Amino acid sequence: RHKFWETQPVGQYKDVGDFSLADGPIELPTPLSDVKQEPYNLPTAYEWTTCDMDSQETCDEVYLLLMNNYVEDDENMFRFNYSKEFLRWALRVPGYYRSWHIGVRAKTSKKLVAFITGVPARIRVNDKVVKMAEVNFLCVHKKLRSKRLAPVLIKEVTRRVHLENIWQAAYTAGVVIPTPITTCQYWHRSLNPKKLIDVGFSRLGARMTMSRTIKLYKLPDSTVTPGFRKMELRDVPAVTRLLRNYLSQFIVAPDFHEDDVEHWLVPRDNVVDSYLVESPKNHEITDFCSFYTLPSSILGNQTHSTLKAAYSYYNVSTKTPLAQLMNDALIVAKQKEFDVFNALDIMHNESFLKDLKFGPGDGQLHYYLYNYRVRSGMKPSELGLVLL
Ligand code: YNC
Ligand code: MG
């Protein structure tokens, strides 16, 4: 059924429920000298390229490939439109390898036709911290689909990850392949219900008028939690402590150090927003919330071309109730003119989704590990990892 994935060191469907298989690596590392030294073969009309994301020109090419060919919803109404600044943030992470930003070009025109990336991360699985690649942005131009190019891209990124002596990876996909560690649901909170209905993202509920719907999703003009403010660079040590402590309760979560928090969570305009609660009494940092900016192109609408979406990222509550903290996040997202706020049912998100008027989406997101087995049957609420 999965000609490619059946050959890979991933949990296979036949192993689901086999409790004799221990958690941990599926295959042992080989000596680095045994890793294939040359890139995998491509069809003769194509060649490998390493994409230098420092270069404005390359960044533009990657941006355009993804803008026109990356992930769409099931009904092909929307397509992710990651911004150039977002792509730079997602790819130039602490300790990144340029060799893991992989493109394929047509030999004659030099046009970029496919892409896949990895970035290094420390991911904790139960009590072990494992160096992994987070693999993302797998994309094949629409005109080159179903030619088995994707397995070649995946094998090539795997080879280049192995060359750095890293043997595990984490990734997410909307498709089911062998074998998800867990399957999550997207939930959506309307901020601009009229636009969402106009573009077909959501529908007017039964017995609802537009004006009742607008009133239902109305939010206060300003946040309510005393001491709620934007995160700053000086907050990195306190936020790292807060987040490390919080993430320690999940089965799978990133092992964030201060340099990771500085990269992933210090606010960047139109890329990532982070807020925290500083106690007005003792200046202690007690709570934290964040979201990233990922617009989608609206395909074939006369009036609107982009849907501005915020995606819930990492949130920690110790003093402020989580629902109140997230309601403040909704308020700032509304102020920043987002149309919708999205969240997965991971970590403690389920506890606020219904109360804050999120509705379940039809999209599912499957999480995967490469060459690492974890006990099957993990619940989304036991997952503490957000991939972009
Ligand atoms: C996918 N998303 O099952 P089998 S997510 C993984 N992730 O193999 P072909 C995928 N595998 O089943 P096409 C996949 N989608 O026969 C398909 N596959 O064993 C598998 N879409 O290849 C599929 N981006 O080239 C099948 O298919 C084989 O031309 C078929 O290309 C697929 O970034 C794709 O959704 C997705 O651009 C490139 O449809 C294309 O259709 C496309 O004939 C729109 O491929 C954009 C899109 C995917 C977003 C993502 C995470 C990717 C993870 C890849 C796996 C990484 C493994 C770890 C590597 C490092 C290891 C170390 C150490
Ligand atoms: Mg193909």
Image (cartoon, grey):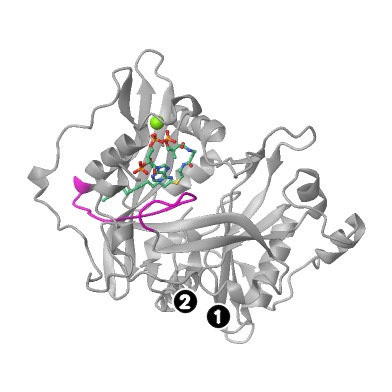
Q: Is residue 169 magenta?
A: yes
Q: Residue at x 21, y 60 (%)?
A: 26
Q: Mark 2 Cα within 10 Å, few/some/many (few <14, many 20+)?
A: some
Q: Nearer the viewer, residue 273 or 110?
A: 110
Res. 227 in view = no
Q: Residue furthest bottom?
A: 281
Question: In the figure, 94 relative to 343: above or below?
Answer: above
Q: Secondary structure at mark 1?
A: strand
Q: Horizontal and vertical percent for residue 297?
A: 65, 38
Span highlighted in magenta in the image? 162-179
Residue at image point 38% right, 39% down:
116
| Identity of the residue drawn at 54% across and 56% down | 364
Kindly check if marks 2 and 1 are in contact, taking CB atoms under 8 A apart as contact.
Answer: yes
Queried whether the magenta region covers residue 145, the answer comes back as no
Which residue, given by chain and number where applicable, does mark 2 sit on? 242
- Is residue 329 visible in the rendered image? The answer is yes
Camera-nearest residue between 173 and 39: 173
Left or right relative to 128: residue 72: right
Residue linked to disc 1 = 286
Is the stretch drawn in magenta largely helix, strand or loop?
loop
Disc 1 residue lies near ligand 1 with CB under 8 A: no
Q: Position of residue 322 (x, y in %)?
A: 62, 77
What amino acid is found at the position of numbered circle 1 in the picture? Thr
> What is the secondary structure assignment of the residue under circle 2?
helix
Up the image or down, 348 lies above or below 341; here it is below
